[in-house]
Amino acid sequence: MRNTLLPRLALRGLYGNRRLYLPFLLATAFMAMVYFVIAAFVYNESFGRSIPNGGNIQILMSVGYFLMPVVLLPFLVYIYSYLLKNRSRELALYAILGLGRRHIAVILLIENTLCFALCILLGAGGGALVCPLVFRGLLAALGIPSGIVWGLSFPPLLATVKVFAACFAVLVVIGVWRAARTQPCSLLREQTQGERPMRGRLLAAILGSSCLFAAYFLSLTSGRSATLASFTLALLLVILGTYGVFTGVIAEVLRRLRKGPRFYTDASEFVVVSGLQHRLRKNAAGLVNICLFGCAALFTLCCSLCVLFGQGAVIARVGQTITNSQSGINFTNVTVEDITLMFTTLAFLGVFFVLVFLACTSLVLYYKQLSEGIEDAGRFRILRSIGLSDEMTVRTARRQLRVVFLLPLGGTLLHIAFATPFLSTFMGLISIDTPLVLYGSIALSMLVFALFYLICYQITIRAYLRTVA
């Protein structure tokens, strides 16, 4: 009985929290599939030999091969913190009923091992099915006859297993450390405990705004002289500035709204402001992550569309002599095949990373709203018992969510608008310098991202309202 109790508790925990774990499993399996496809191109030796310039394609693919784990680990850590937070009461009850920290660690280990196995099974299985289709699509884009046979090998599977095993091992360490360092009474209060009023909100707002202005000024003044160092500095300033603005400015605005007369006379105003203040720092961290993942997806989408729409003009200039006033590709030393190869591979990688960043954005949105819905269910139940109608509950919940959703969307669009000079510089390196292509791609990318974001809003608000109902 003792040997089967912990596995049974782990299975029951996964099944009982399937609403939390199913999106997590699907998202990680999708990313495992993407990584498996990229690794399959990198490790396929026959691909490099049988296709003209296939070795160069593999070199470009290796950029995504090494970059994706850097994006994957922080994302999984952030999402896993939501999972642990929503299971804090369950873990506390285990401790109160007599399970030691070692037993809780074993439960978390079993759960993560099962999630890892399902992630690899679904990801590698999906990747094995998708790889031939992607290979044929790449051959068609390169204009190569489809008589070449695609073959899978063991190294891509091994690489995928290693990367995701390392990520899930980090998640196990985080879960065990949190269970070991936190007392059961603290875990019981964690889901309903509010946050203390933030100190230094005015200073945070000023510093955050200053960082954003500095990043925007650096982008606008760099022009064609922009370098990777200036782009990295601007990116760090945007990250710090976004957190400072979302934390300090929102705190100051909520403080002023709380002092206004409508806070005590309008029930919806009272509920919305109180709900946002209840978890201000968590809201700020979640909004910053949504905004940054959205910026990454939108910037990558802009680059992919620029490559897609601008390659025709670049191919038409093959064979021309580059002048002193031009920058980018030296067209006297390249062929049409070289340009097509480079642009097709860049677009291929861009599509994959756009899908990854969009998946990260949507999953952070979902978990943020589901976690907050679980927290708000008790608050709305109390408000309904003292006279708040169901209609007003839905209206105030929608109003609160609208505020939370519009902030990262507005921040994302604003960041990308000011990042246009950097985007223009990067596209100039591959000789895409047509203003119509650049600004048209940015406008279309913003439209596509806004539609995607609104669809995510409708899906997550339904999950939130079902939770608080």
Image (cartoon, rainbow, N blue to C red):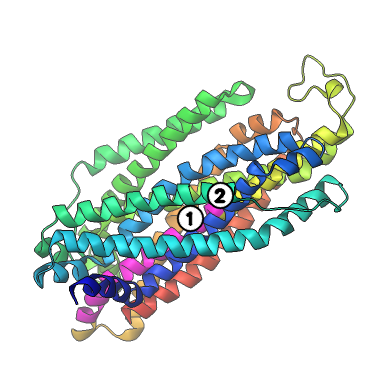
The numbered mark, 1 or 2, whose residue comes first in the sequence reads 2
The label number, if any, that marks residue 360 in the structure image: 1
Find out whether residue 105 is within the magenta segment: no
Name the residue at 64% across, 31% down: 426
Dot 1 falls on a residue whose secondary structure is helix
Of 341 and 202, the residue lying toward us:
341
- Three-letter code for the amino acid on which mark 2 is drawn: Ala
Number of callouts: 2
Main secondary structure of the magenta stretch: helix
The label number, if any, that marks residue 297 in the structure image: 2
Find out whether residue 381 is within the magenta segment: yes
Q: Nearer the viewer, mark 1 or mark 2?
A: 1
Of 145 and 308, the residue lying toward us:
145
Label 2: few (<14), some (14–19) or many (≥20) C-alpha neighbours in 10 Å: many
Name the residue at 52% across, 49% down: 158
Of 150 and 344, the residue lying toward us:
150
Q: Quadrant of the N terminus?
A: bottom left
Q: Are marks 1 and 2 in contact (CB under 8 Å)?
A: yes
Name the residue at 44% across, 76% down: 462
The picture quadrant where one finds residue 389 is bottom left
